[in-house]
Image (cartoon, grey):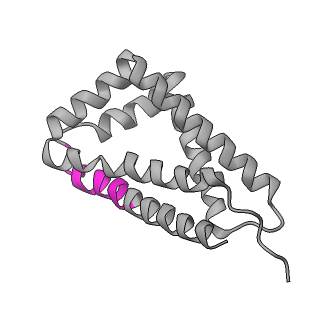
Amino acid sequence: MKTKSKIYWFETIFFLFFGIFHLHKIWGLFDRNRYATYWLSVMTNKDIIYYLLMIILITLCIVGIIVFIKSKSNNYWWRWIYIFGGGYVLFDISAITLEISWWNSLLQFMFDVNNPYWNIIWGLFILMGLLSFVLGLYIFKLNKQS
């Protein structure tokens, strides 16, 4: 039986960070206008907050993908999230940076405060954040035990 690869310290940070990042979207359920205005402004103005967030997201995703590839023969199940989730995040950041029109239209739809699907869209992100945060705590516990 193969032993699992080492759990790296950043894996807890990866899931806790993404968890908190998505859990903050609860704000959007209570104050659609300010939430949408703030994040559309961040994406449009590309100020220091934007670049700091992008650097953190890109770094975590790339390191996660490297860990997945490096440990491909004895990975933990959650490392598949680095491939699919990280791949999505890298695509999202690239599409925003390259100003791909259909992606911009999707973002405008998502941030439309009159969108009848607002609570469903942001609720799914919040659920994803909760699951990510709980997974981060689980990985932290596993790492402490080993």
> Which residue occupies the foreground of this view, 71 or 102?
71
Residue 65 at x, y = what percent?
Answer: 70, 48
- Side of 105 where 119 appears, left or right: left
Comparing 56 with 85, the one in front is 56
On the rendered structure, is 15 left or right of 19?
right
Q: Is residue 102 visible?
A: no
Q: As displayed, is residue 140 above or below residue 103?
A: below
Residues rendered magenta in the picture? 115-127
- Residue 63 versus residue 73 in the image, above or below: above
> Looking at the image, is 76 positioned above or below residue 65?
below
- Measured as percent of width and height from the top left, residue 64 is found at 66, 49
Number of marks drawn: 0
Question: In screen coordinates, is 91 left or right of 52?
Answer: right
Image quarter hosting the N terminus: bottom right
Q: Examine the structure image and report whether residue 122 is included in the region drawn in magenta.
A: yes
Q: Where is residue 47 in the image (x, y as percent from the top left)?
A: 39, 16
Judging depth in this view, the residue of 38 and 67 nearest the camera is: 67
As drawn, 19 above or below 59:
below
Q: Can residue 138 be seen by looking at this rendering?
A: yes
